[in-house]
């Protein structure tokens, strides 16, 4: 869950509770490819004008594809786990699902998007 550029792990405890609930319902290991991103050192966050959910320790990208991706989405969409935003990347070699719990009040509209 550490930033690969700074080594810092600043994951939000409430977000981690959401992720733990998902993991328990999914009942399989989940490969997290991106979690906390240091807003000053991680190149994706450093170039943004407005920091993303990863910079707040409230997002993960889960390496998942095919039937497993569908299962993760079904769990997220049919249970009130606290996730408010879902990004889906299911083409090419780097398939993943982004999950976060940022709110509209924080300037992050609740949405589902594809990459």
Image (tube, rainbow, N blue to C red):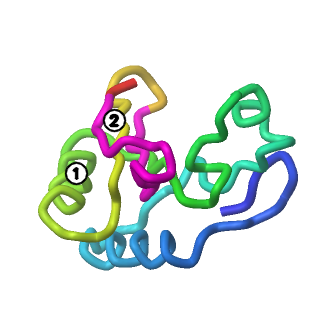
Query: 115 or 13: which is nearer to us?
Result: 13
Does 90 sit left or right of 73 as displayed? right
Q: Quadrant of the C terminus?
A: top left
- The tally of labels here is 2
**Considering the numbered disc 1 on the image, is that residue within a helix, a strand or a loop?**
helix
Please tell me which of labels 1 and 2 falls first in the chain. Answer: 1
Q: Marks 2 and 1: in contact by CB < 8 Å? A: yes
Give the x, y percent position of residue 11. 64, 67
Q: Which residues are magenta?
A: 95-113
Q: Is residue 56 magenta?
A: no
Label 1: which residue? 73
In the displayed structure, 99 sits above or below 10; it is: above
Specify the quadrant that holds the N terminus. Answer: bottom right
In percent of width and height, residue 48 lies at 70, 28
Looking at the rendered structure, the secondary structure element under dot 2 is: strand
- Residue 22 position in % (x across, y down): 32, 70
Q: Residues within 10 Å of mark 2 (few under 14, many from 20)?
A: many
Furthest toward the top, the residue is 92
Residue at mark 1 to residue at mark 2: CA–CA distance: 9 Å
Give the residue drawn at x 71%, y 49%.
Answer: 37
Q: Residue at x 35, y 47 (%)?
A: 85
């Amino acid at each position: 869950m550490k930033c690969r550029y700074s080594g810092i792990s600043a994951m939000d405890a409430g977000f981690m509770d959401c992720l733990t609930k998902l993991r328990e319902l999914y009942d399989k290991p989940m490969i997290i490819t991106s979690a906390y991103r240091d807003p000053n050192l991680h190149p994706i966050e450093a170039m943004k004008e407005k920091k993303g959910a990863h910079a707040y320790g409230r997002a993960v990208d889960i390496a998942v594809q095919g039937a497993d991706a569908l299962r993760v989405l079904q769990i997220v969409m049919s249970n009130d786990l606290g996730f408010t935003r879902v990004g889906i990347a299911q083409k090419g070699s780097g398939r993943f699902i982004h999950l976060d719990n940022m709110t509209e009040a924080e300037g992050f509209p609740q949405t589902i998007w594809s990459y």
